Amino acid sequence: MPVCRCPRRHLISLLLFLFHSEAACRPSGKRPCKMQVFRIWDVNQKTFYLRNNQLVAGYLQGANTRLEEKVDVLPVESHAVILGIHGGQLCLACVKSGDKVKLQLQAVNITDVAKSKEQAKRFAFIRSSSGSTTRFESAACPGWFLCTASEADQPVSLTNRPAEPVTITRFYFQQDP
């Protein structure tokens, strides 16, 4: 039987996500969730942008800085968020097929996703901060983290090996004014 090596706070966040608390933000309840917009870039300074309908991370300079994708964030529990782009019309989803886990952009409304606990799970990421950086772990696939490649202009994806030097799982995450 595999042993979980997750920090205790990640397990607690996952349990809070799976078993909604009454104090949690709910789109259809008395405390409506509010989508916020953030800038995101990895610790190597690569920002997110769309290329051929795929989210990639690269170095944008000059006129290309307008290509940067801002990340729409909708809190669903204390440390769990749904991530989207384009005004919350495209959401990042963790999709599992057999042993393979991959990140997909899916055309769904971010607030509609949050209304269904079952549907929200594959779109939810547990956000954990360490100093000035943040990691995003899939709620649907624990142990899989949002990542970028060490090379520029490669797809944003998921990894279950966050310590490998070829993937970057630490991001600067700043609310956009």
Image (tube, rainbow, N blue to C red):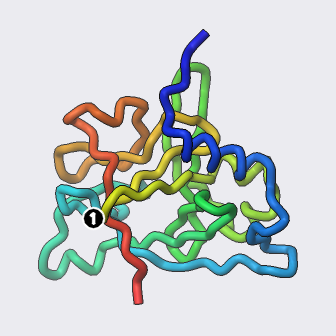
Residue receiving disc 1: 47
Three-letter amino acid code at the position of disc 1: Thr
Q: Position of residue 85 (x, y in %)?
A: 50, 69
Q: Is residue 84 visible?
A: yes
Q: Please tell me which residue lies in front, 6 or 31.
A: 6
Q: Residues within 10 Å of mark 1 (few under 14, many from 20)?
A: many
In the rendered structure, the answer to whether residue 35 lies left or right of residue 169 reads: right
Find numbered disc 1 in the image and state the secondary structure of the residue it sits on.
strand
Residue at the image point whose x is 85% and y is 74% from the top: 28
Does residue 118 sit above or below 35 in this rendering?
above
Q: Position of residue 127 (x, y in %)?
A: 50, 56
Q: In the rendered image, which quarter is residue 138 located in? A: top right
Residue at the image point whose x is 55% and y is 77% from the top: 87
Q: Is residue 52 visible?
A: no
Residue at the image point whose x is 57% and y is 60% from the top: 91
Q: Position of residue 86 (x, y in %)?
A: 51, 73
